[in-house]
Amino acid sequence: EAGVTQFPSHSVIEKGQTVTLRCDPISGHDNLYWYRRVMGKEIKFLLHFVKESKQDESGMPNNRFLAERTGGTYSTLKVQPAELEDSGVYFCASSQPLFGNTIYFGEGSWLTVV
Amino acid sequence: AQSVTQPDIHITVSEGASLELRCNYSYGATPYLFWYVQSPGQGLQLLLKYFSGDTLVQGIKGFEAEFKRSQSSFNLRKPSVHWSDAAEYFCAVGALPSGGYQKVTFGTGTKLQVIP
C-alpha cells in the first residue's frame, strides 16, 4: 500500500512568487492534514480536511495560504505570494476516521524562499 | 488545549549506550501519545504510539516508551543506541477522536547525536 506522497519534494522560489504543494493521502483516508516546520521550530498544525470539507483551518498563518481538496482525494496548498519566512518543510498527513487512528505523514515538501 | 514539552533540545550519547528522551504532556483527558522520528532530509516516521492498555509500548527499531499518567510523561527509551539512530525525535499528543478527527500537537523535538 502506498503511503502519503507529496510533491515537489524540494522547491526553491523567489520572494513574491507562487508555489503549489500537492499531497496524495493514503487511499481510503478521509482525514487529511497539513503541518509545517519553519526555521527549525516545532511542527505546527495548519489545517485539516474531512473528505473535501475544511474541518479546522485555525493554524493557517494568513490569507497568503490557500488549501483545497477537490473531490476529497488529493489536496493542494498554495502560497501566494511567498515570503522569506515561509521557508521550511510542509508535511501532509492522513488518517482513517476510526477510533484510535494513527496519523501517517508524508516525507514533506521542503520549501526555500530566496 | 493539549501541549507537549520536550525539555532536552539536544542529547549526545555514545554508540552502544542506553538512551532516554523525555516527554511531558498536558491534556485534560486520556491522551493519545506518539513518538515520531525525522532523520536528516527525511520525513516523519512513526516509532510507536499509545492509546490504551499496557503502559509500556514497543515500537520499531528497538525503541520503547512508557506512559506514566501520574507524571504526565511518555519517555522514549532504547537500551543500546546505534549510529543510525542519530535524528530528531518528536513526542506528540492527540486529542480524543471526535467524529474521527484528532488534532496532533508536537513537542519542539530533541536532536540526538551519536558519537563512536
Image: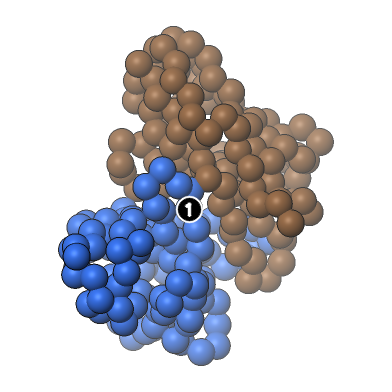
Chain colours: A brown, B blue
Res. A85 visible in picture: yes
User: Vertical placement of B54 versus A22: above or below?
Assistant: below
Tell me: B10 left or right of B71: left
The three-letter amino acid code for the residue at tag 1 is Leu
> Considering depth in this image, is A44 or B60 the residue closer to the camera?
B60
Q: Position of residue A72 (x, y in %)?
A: 78, 40
Q: Where is residue B98 in the image (x, y as percent from the top left)?
A: 65, 63
Residue at position x 45%, y 16% in the image: A13
> Considering depth in this image, is A23 or A71 the residue closer to the camera?
A23
Q: Which chain carries label 1?
A: B
Q: State the image quarter where residue A53 is shown.
A: top right
Residue at the extreme right: A71
Res. B8 visible in picture: no
Which residue does the numbered mark 1 point to in the structure image? B44
Circle 1 crowding by C-alpha within 10 Å: few under 14, some 14–19, many from 20: many
Please state, as top left, top right, bottom left or bottom right, where the C terminus of chain A lies in the image.
top left
**Figure disc tally:** 1
Residue at the extreme bottom: B54
Q: SS for tag 1?
A: strand
User: Vertical placement of A29 versus B28: above or below?
Assistant: above
Q: State the image quarter where residue B77 is shown.
A: bottom left
Residue at position x 68%, y 35% in the image: A75
Tell me: A66 left or right of A84: right
Residue at position x 71%, y 59% in the image: A96
User: Vertical placement of B96 versus B86: above or below?
Assistant: below
